[in-house]
Amino acid sequence: MNILDLPDEILLCILNKLNNINILYSLVDVNQRFDRLALDSIYIRDLDFTANDKSQEYRQFLDRFCTSILPRIHHQINKLTLGHLSIERLLHIVDYSQLYSLSLIVCVPETILNYLIGDTILIRLLNKQITHFNLKTEFRTIELFGRYEPTLFVMVLSFAKCLTDFTFVQCHRDPSTNSLFTVFSPHCVSSTLTKLKIDVNTLDDCLYILDGRFDCLSILIIDIEKIRPLLSNIDTTKQISKLKYLSLTSISLTSFYHEFVPLFRRMPNLEELTLFLFVKRINSTYIDGIHLNNEILIHMPRLNKFTFSITTLACNRQSNIILPSNDDIQRSFIERRCQQIGSYADDNTMKIRARCHIYSLPYQFHMFHNVTNSFKGGIFNKVRSVIIIDDIRPFEHEFFQIISQSFPFLETLSIQNDEPQKYKTNSFTFITFPHLAVLNLELAHIDYVEQFLFERKTRLPCLLHLTIQYESLVMITNNFTNDPTRLNFTQLKNLVTDKSFIRPENFHSYFPQL
């Protein structure tokens, strides 16, 4: 049976699963039946124009969509997601009378700034009807980010009179940049916003957001590039009584954990808390269940859900500081009747520089960073990015078997270890990372380069991006003379090294996709 002869309900189901507006709207004007199916309100309500945003075929599709289809459906669209090209085409043609949710992915800052000046459709939408606005910036350089990010944020807030849900996410951030609120502080306000998801540079930004300028805010999801000492004179005593949900993420190492712990004591009505932190403590012990309870949780009487992943790097030169064992860490949670948690901790013989990682279970984050040899495994189906690091002990073959089994959907892996492997043999079983696309070996000993790039040890069928020192690349290929088929390079499309080099004559045999 021809697929086009299928009943309407089955054909609609197939089209829905395809989720491709290019294919869907190719059916328009074929006949009356396809018009009815393609223009069904189930598809019109939520349209995403970000796929294949740069292809010539997509440009042709947009031409046809804007001239033949959009005039027939614009008044029925509720949610709209636009990329760089589609922003330019779809944001100045028609009004969208039923639109309440708008998502924009911006690469060139002028693209969006032009729509925030004068009497534009975007300004009218923000002013009168948009309640959910997502703005993701993918500026090419950090310089562009620093120049335009504060302007975009304050301009959106100044026009958005109905906004309740605002997502402001940046792909490039500069930790040396000042607070987002420093220049425009008096203008960054909203009396309607109840949910804010935002990437910021500093802890100052977080405290500004919670100083009362968003007086209806009940949900805050914030990613802080770098937690540093406070630079601004911000009121840090006011109670934050309306906040019900807080998610605070910062993947960069911070020595200023003490700067923001008092923040949690100002949230008496918080019901859910999510933390992802990497903390450096000097002449101190690990963060454990006792610390979390006494310093944070005891101040939140209404808290009913606590999701966390906290790594402590303890740097101690005082011999009288005894680091707790992993069993001690586990007991610190059990004695306080906390939820199930996982942990691994370096033993006390490495107390000068040791790590401990505590996390709630089931694990809810896509990142699992600072994994040491103390990690004994588990099942983490949501994790896509892993960083493994050890300053003292080498990673042996069995450890990588644990990593592959514990993170079955791993896509990005970084290895940081300068210690050579002790046990080297060709009798090991193969290890496969079936989904690994990005591998960073820049800070890895040559033994780990061999461990991952030689197929006799590890198979990487999906490896697309490799970061490696040029010297290691020369060694692993024996100055580009080894048999290329022994290496995991067949699918590689991006190679980053610490120095530029002239490609040797047989370079393409190693990297056929480059």
Image (spheres, grey):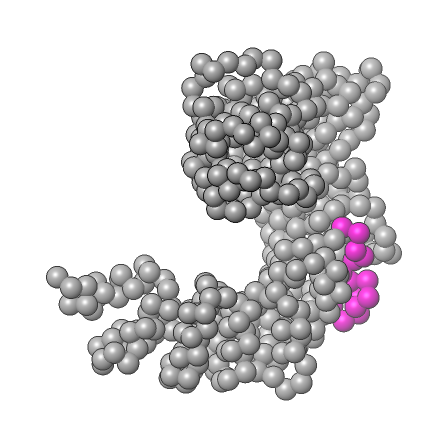
Q: Is residue 1 above or below residue 26?
A: above
Residue 188 lies in magenta, yes or no?
yes
Along the line of sight, which residue is nearer the eye, 139 or 38?
139
Along the line of sight, which residue is nearer the eye, 284 or 333?
284
Residue 186 lies in magenta, yes or no?
yes
Q: Is residue 240 above or below residue 478?
A: below
Residue at (48%, 29%) from the top-left corner? 483
Left or right of 71? Residue 507 is: right
Task: Give the residues drawn in magenta, as a range.
Answer: 175-189
Q: Is residue 451 visible?
A: yes
Residue 297, position as x, y percentages in the image: 66, 39
Q: Quadrant of the N terminus?
A: bottom left
Left or right of 193? Residue 266 is: right
Secondary structure that dominates the magenta span: loop
Residue at (75%, 56%) from the top-left corner? 205
Left or right of 139? Residue 180 is: right
Q: Is residue 57 above or below residue 211?
A: below
Residue at (45%, 24%) from the top-left corner? 456
Residue 350, position as x, y percentages in the image: 72, 17
Residue at (19%, 63%) from the top-left corner? 3
Residue 38, position as x, y percentages in the image: 30, 73
Q: Quadrant of residue 125?
A: bottom right
